[in-house]
Image: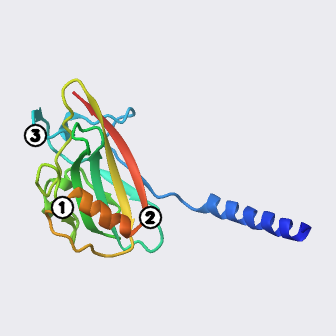
Amino acid sequence: MKHILRALSFGGTLLAMGSAYAADFTVSSAAADASMRLSEKYFANGFGCAGGNLSPQISWKNAPKGTKSFAISMYDPDAPTGSGWWHWVAINIPASVSELPEGAGSSIDKMPSGSTMTGTDVGQSAYFGACPPKGETHHYVITVKALSVEKLDLPTNASGALVGFMTNANKLGEAKITFKAGR
């Protein structure tokens, strides 16, 4: 019995040591200040907002081994819809990419070659900026998912929910960053 306990203890120590050296998959952005608030240049230019409609710069590192592509989304869980709001959904971003510059989501020609942007909740296949109701502050969650497939064969009008289903089925890992925006 002592040998079994000693072996289990040693194995647990090795696992703890291994995880201490494993780098975490993370996402970051130069778009927000220290309070993680988005400026109006990242707000929509529509639905009562008059922002610049620029997608924020995002970068990520330490993607899981075996990553063949990435998917990115921006989602507002606080939207008064009962189901949140998809502001940006992009798939088929090549595994060699680790950053999207500011404004990349405005048009597919600004995205990395091979990428696809799918439908948002305003019915467009491009970034649609933050636009919380007046007097409210909302959270905008940008998620980068590392996928085990090079390509998801989805139409450009695929909903955020359908993309979420397919990316979760092929996900190796994910990293998130949450911004706040209010007006």
Q: CA distance from mark 3 to mark 2?
A: 33 Å
What amino acid type is highlighted by mark number 1? Thr
In the picture provided, is 179 more to the left or to the right than 18?
left
In the picture provided, is 107 more to the left or to the right than 99?
left
Instruction: For mark 3, give the secondary structure.
Output: strand
Q: Quadrant of the C terminus?
A: top left
Could one spot residue 66 in this view of the protein? Answer: yes
Earlier along the polypeptide chain: callout 3 or callout 2?
Answer: 3
The image position of residue 78, as x and y in percent, is 29, 38
Identity of the residue drawn at 48% across and 71% down: 65
Tags 1 and 3 touching, CB below 8 Å: no
Tell me where residue 116 sits by quadrant.
Answer: bottom left
In the picture provided, is 46 more to the left or to the right than 160?
left
Instruction: For mark 1, give the secondary structure.
Output: loop
What amino acid type is highlighted by mark number 3? Asn
Q: CA distance from mark 1 to mark 3?
A: 19 Å
Instruction: For mark 2, give the secondary structure.
Output: loop
Q: Outermost residue toward the top?
A: 135
Earlier along the polypeptide chain: callout 2 or callout 1?
Answer: 2
The image position of residue 1, as x and y in percent, is 90, 68
In the picture provided, is 94 more to the left or to the right than 81?
right
Which residue corresponds to mark 3? 45
62 or 152, which is in the foreground? 152
